[in-house]
Amino acid sequence: MSSLRSSLSLDRLGSVIAVLIGVALFASPFVIYRANRIVAGEWRMLADALPSSGAIGVMAVALGVALCAALVRAPLIRLAAAAIGLCAIFPAVGSSAAFVTPPGNTFARVSPSLGFWLLALAFALLAADALTRLRLGPWARLAALAVAAGAIALLLVSGAWNDLSLLKEYASRADTFWREAREHLWLAFGSMIAACLVGLPLGILGHRVRRLRNAILQVLNIVQTVPSIALFGILIAPLGYLAAHVPLAAALGIRGIGAAPAFIALFLYSLLPVVANTITGLKQVPAAVIDAARGMGLSARQRLWQVELPLALPVILTGIRIVLVQNLGLATVAALIGGGGFGTFVFQGIGQTAIDLVLLGAIPTVALSFAAAIILDAFIDLTRRGSP
């Protein structure tokens, strides 16, 4: 009797997911139709956004996923249900754009609406819950990320989303998009690498010389508390003066606005996590291990490179993970001072009240941050497993 009750009991998270799916299907529009890219849109429910057979099919799949989420606890079954749900709604929203748009109309815009986003959120939550219950190792998590990235790439290459407003915005700005993507990645990764080159020695110095430790951390804490917009503004005047009076600086592209102040600001924000985690990681190395290395005749430099840094690597990588995810997000703000990046589309879209242009910049930023977090988390786990 007790086993029967447990098998019929509702899963708490699954019940929430089922409610989200119900709201998405019966109380939220699936897409928004606009006569052009900036006018107010008309909501279309799922039944009106697809042919009857397609709408019924999507509803049947979504309701089946809701039942599975609420009643089934087996992780593999939950993961399979989530995957089926995602494979149903992503092509469906592309098909709805072609179905809703009048034939031959090149000005109309169709965008995913609340119902689609709620379904995507519900299925993603179910997939994440299933993956958490499976307790995948680092290589399995990387494989899952690769599968998800491949599925999204296949969807985009197939042309299933070409009629959506988001892809139309991309089509008219493809060259600009990839140029800003390179700029965004350069700002985020370049500032992270520069922070590692400076922050790791500072962290080692702070660990070795206790008198300097508090001074270094206090200065970096002060920098971290300055809002990003304010820091960008503070850097405009000195860099502008430098560009005006030092020809070499101007030749290198250093000026009051543009990529230079954005790069420097991201570099300054990156220092605290790198330095603090380097100090913390080195402090956590057991004294007995260091004494054993000293007894084996290793010099101070050998102990640092062969013993202390390898043992502190997981903590140091955690700081680098924080930096990279932080910089991928903060690089968006760099567009306000002409620094480029995906923020260019975000702020252009806000100025033009074009939500799809905002999403063209926001979605890649979120996707890059999410992927970077998963990849670095996996590397951190691998380094911890390799530690004695």
Image (cartoon, grey):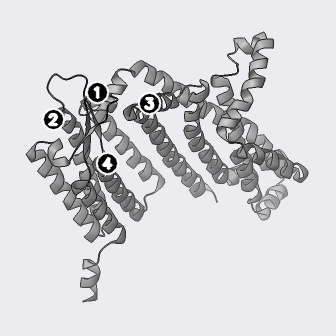
Q: Name the residue beneath numbered marker 2.
A: 99
Which is more N-terminal, label 1 or label 2? Answer: 1
Q: Which mark is residue 332?
A: none
Q: Residues within 10 Å of mark 1 (few under 14, many from 20)?
A: some
Please give left or right for residue 339 compared with residue 149 in the image: right
Q: Which amino acid, mark 2? A: Phe
Q: Residues within 10 Å of mark 4 (few under 14, many from 20)?
A: many
Residue drawn at point x = 68 percent, y = 27 percent: 261
Between circles 1 and 3, the one closer to the viewer is 1
Q: Residues within 10 Å of mark 3 (few under 14, many from 20)?
A: some
The x, y position of residue 76, in whole percent, is: 30, 62
> Disc 2 and disc 4: Cα gap in Å?
18 Å
In the picture, which quadrant includes the N terminus? bottom left
Q: Is residue 341 visible?
A: yes
The x, y position of residue 254, in whole percent, is: 70, 19
Q: Which mark is residue 349?
A: 3
Q: Which amino acid, mark 3? A: Gly
Q: Is residue 302 visible?
A: no
Q: Which amino acid, mark 4? A: Leu
Which is more N-terminal, label 3 or label 2? Answer: 2
Which is more N-terminal, label 4 or label 2? Answer: 2
> Disc 3 and disc 4: Cα gap in Å?
19 Å
